[in-house]
Amino acid sequence: MKKLMISALLVLCSVSVSAHTLWVLPSHFVLSSEDSWISVDVSAANMTFVADKGVSPANLSIVFPDGERHAFSQSYQGKRKSQADHQLTMDGTYRIELAGPARYFTFFEEDGERRRLMVNKQERAEKIPANATNVVTTRSRGRALSYVSVNAPNKTALALHNEGLELKLLTHPADVVATEPVQWQFMLDGQPAADVQIELSREGELYRDTAGREVLTSDAEGRIRFTPPEPGRYVLEASLQQESTSALADRVRESLTLTFEAALP
């Protein structure tokens, strides 16, 4: 299957990697014993799972099946990829997340020149010149996610925060099976997000004549439906840009990637 992209570029963990997809890739998606260790690769790349640029793991965390968030016990940033390890000490589903806080950018023109300040709408009045024109403030946020289940999967770590672009996993990640339909739902600030554009891609792109990426769009209720054609690891990439009525921004630009595995049928 294919890779998902929407308005390009993930601004995750306070690092912008232009024209690259940022992903987190766990060494295992399903484990059968407690106290197993998980290793996670983090990279930004043009080709699916072909590591290209190491990304800081500073904002990488793991949510345990009881909902408690932890920093990884050890991590390393390399040139091509970064890596982190942690011990999984309980049964259930874990959420691996690379995400930084939302950032605000105010763009404006002054004397015919395009300028930018990192301030929100409430802050910009005191920061931008009095003669500024075409003033627009954008809220930008991104996340890279994956889920790992040990023995009996549960849903605590799947809970949404109703903030930014999120994915409601109607089909549990541990239940994704090749040749069987999957249904997920995009949400923006807790509400269904229509017209989210997505690319879905499958590992092995380096060894195929065509990338074989599948492009999807969420429906009026924010839902997407697809069927993984074969077992393996996939990455879904989505982004959304739209006008906002927020007191802090005129526009929102959100992006999200999810790495998951389709099991043997």
Image: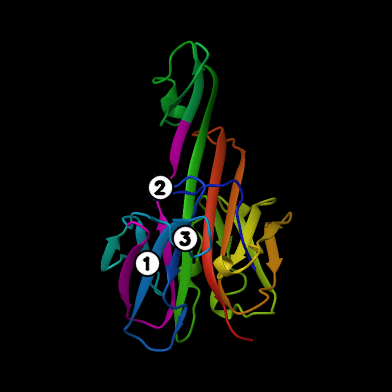
Q: Nearer the viewer, residue 125 or 258?
A: 258
Q: Residue, x 44% and y 20% (percent of image)?
A: 125
Identify the magenta region. Answer: 79-105
Question: In the rendered image, which residue does mark 3 sit on?
Answer: 23
Q: Is residue 84 on the magenta stretch?
A: yes
Residue 214 percent location from the top left of the image: 68, 62
3D distance between C-alphas at marks 3 and 2: 17 Å
Q: Which residue lies furthest to the left in this view?
A: 74
Question: In the rendered image, which residue does mark 2 sit on?
Answer: 101
Kind of residue at badge 2: Pro
Provide the secondary structure element on which disc 3 rests. strand
Q: In this view, does 27 lie to the left or right of 78?
A: right
User: Which SS does the magenta portion mostly show?
Assistant: strand
Q: Nearer the viewer, residue 252 or 49?
A: 49
Provide the secondary structure element on which disc 2 rests. loop
Kind of residue at badge 1: Ile
